[in-house]
Image (cartoon, rainbow, N blue to C red):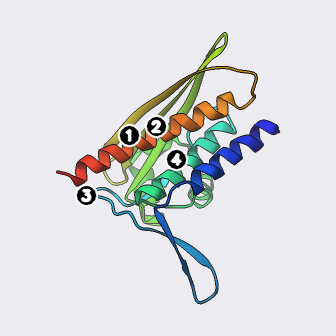
Amino acid sequence: MLFRYLLMVYTFLFLISYPAFSEKQTSSGFVLKQNQTKLPSGVPARVGVAIFSGKEPLNQHATDQFSAGLLELGFDVIERNHFQSILDEQNISNTALFSDKTRSELGKQLGLEAIFVGSVTDEKKLLKVTTHVNVKLVNINTGRVLWAATAKDPRILGKRLTDLGTSISHTVNEALKMLENDLEKLRNT
């Protein structure tokens, strides 16, 4: 329980640490956060993020953290629960996301241009843990992998229960930094 709480705190701190958003109050009083970052031309803007494969609940926290980071980078991310409910409703697994028919249907229903899919794994040896995050951006129409990254975080386990969660958080941040660097390269070409 403590582990989940601390992982949620790390995720919250990550979400509020980026200044890429400005607030706008609507006529109904809701405060919207609008992203001020623009994606390079040719990069799919409207994306879904499938829940990363891996151990629960770490995979879900990693997915949420990655989705939040995508917003920071300028992507229009479909809310995970809405995306997942469509997958569940149509009895679609993450592995089925790679079929042409499935991708096409999701693209039509949600207006997606691409889907991020990924996995979270960890290796534990004695007092060391190494977490890995593998992420791919897949074009919704062609199935072509547009971008992929593998990030890892080796860490010596201490007395804290949060070491695995911290490692995963750092690994997700590393994958997001890789994506950010690749987007910056596209902006400069």
Q: Nearer the viewer, mark 4 or mark 1?
A: 1
At x 71% / y 32%, what residue is drawn?
A: 162
Q: Secondary structure at mark 2?
A: helix
- Mark 1 or mark 4, which is nearer the start of the sequence? 4
Q: Secondary structure at mark 1?
A: helix
Report the front residue among 23 and 67.
23
Amino acid type, callout 3? Gly
At x 56% / y 74%, what residue is drawn?
A: 32
Q: Position of residue 18 (x, y in %)?
A: 51, 56
* Quadrant, the N terminus: top right
Q: CA distance from mark 2 to mark 1?
A: 6 Å
Q: Nearer the viewer, mark 3 or mark 4?
A: 4
Q: What residue did someone put label 2 on?
A: 174
Relative placement, left or right, of 19 versus 141 is right
At x 47% / y 43%, what residue is drawn?
A: 117
In the displayed structure, 70 sits above or below 23; it is above
Q: Residue furthest left?
A: 189
Q: Position of residue 35 (x, y in %)?
A: 45, 66
Q: What residue did someone put label 3 on?
A: 42
Residue 49 can be seen in this image: no
Q: What residue did someone put label 4 on?
A: 66
Amino acid type, callout 2? Glu
Query: Label 1 near label 4: C-beta < 8 Å?
Result: no
Q: What residue did someone put label 1 on?
A: 178
Q: Secondary structure at mark 4?
A: helix
Amino acid type, callout 4? Phe
Query: Label 1 near label 2: C-beta < 8 Å?
Result: yes
At x 66% / y 34%, what residue is drawn?
A: 165
